[in-house]
Image (tube, helix red, strand yellow):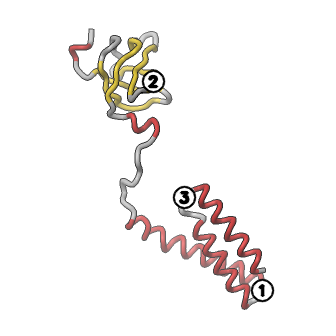
Amino acid sequence: MWKLWLILSGIFLIIEIINLGFFMFWFSIGALIAMIVSLFIDNTIIQVIVFLISSTVLLFVTKPLANKILPKESLIKTNSFAMEGKIGKVTVPIEPIEAKGQVKVNGETWSAKSYNNEFIPKDSEIIVEKIDGVKLIVKPISSSNNQ
């Protein structure tokens, strides 16, 4: 039975590596504890109970500890969310009525809508306010660019 617990531990670790949620890791440790118990006790029911209890206890004891240790702002903005606050230039005039417009930000071309549903002419500098689906919601940087 110890081989089965070792295989289960490996499976849980592989799932943890794929998932990166720091959740399955404790089931892997619980399977290792059950493996050690299986070396001394042949009763499968006791092994399963040890696995479930140890995994659950480890999960609930370490979760608050991890929340204290890890900073609250540990999320790093990536992909499209990293665009918020960036400066760009209008390459196709932003026309709210026709829902047209494109901007170039960090060398990438994005579809865009204006933040206040206003017309923004070509070559105007903009700042990205937020993301809405695959479109950037932008504002002109200075009101002198608006016509």
User: Going 64% across and 81% down the picture, which residue do you hit?
Assistant: 33
Q: Earlier in the sequence, mark 3 or mark 1?
A: 3
The residue wearing badge 3 is 21
Q: Residue 66: give x, y in percent of width and height.
A: 44, 67
Q: Nearer the viewer's eye, disc 3 or disc 1?
A: 3
Precedes in sequence: disc 1 or disc 2:
1
- Distance between the Cα atoms at labels 2 and 3? 31 Å
Q: Which mark is residue 43?
A: 1
Res. 104 mark: none
Tell me what residue is drawn at x 72 percent, y 75 percent: 5
Quadrant where the image shows the N terminus:
bottom right
Disc ID at residue 110:
2
Q: Residue at x 33, y 20 (%)?
A: 116
Say whether residue 77 is left or right of residue 127. Answer: right
x then y, percent, for residue 90: 36, 17
Check disc 2 and give the amino acid type.
Trp
**Residue 119 at least partly seen:** no
For label 2, the crowd category at 10 Å Cα-Cα, with few meaning under 14, some 14 to 19 and many 20 or more, is some
Does 117 appear above or below 2?
above
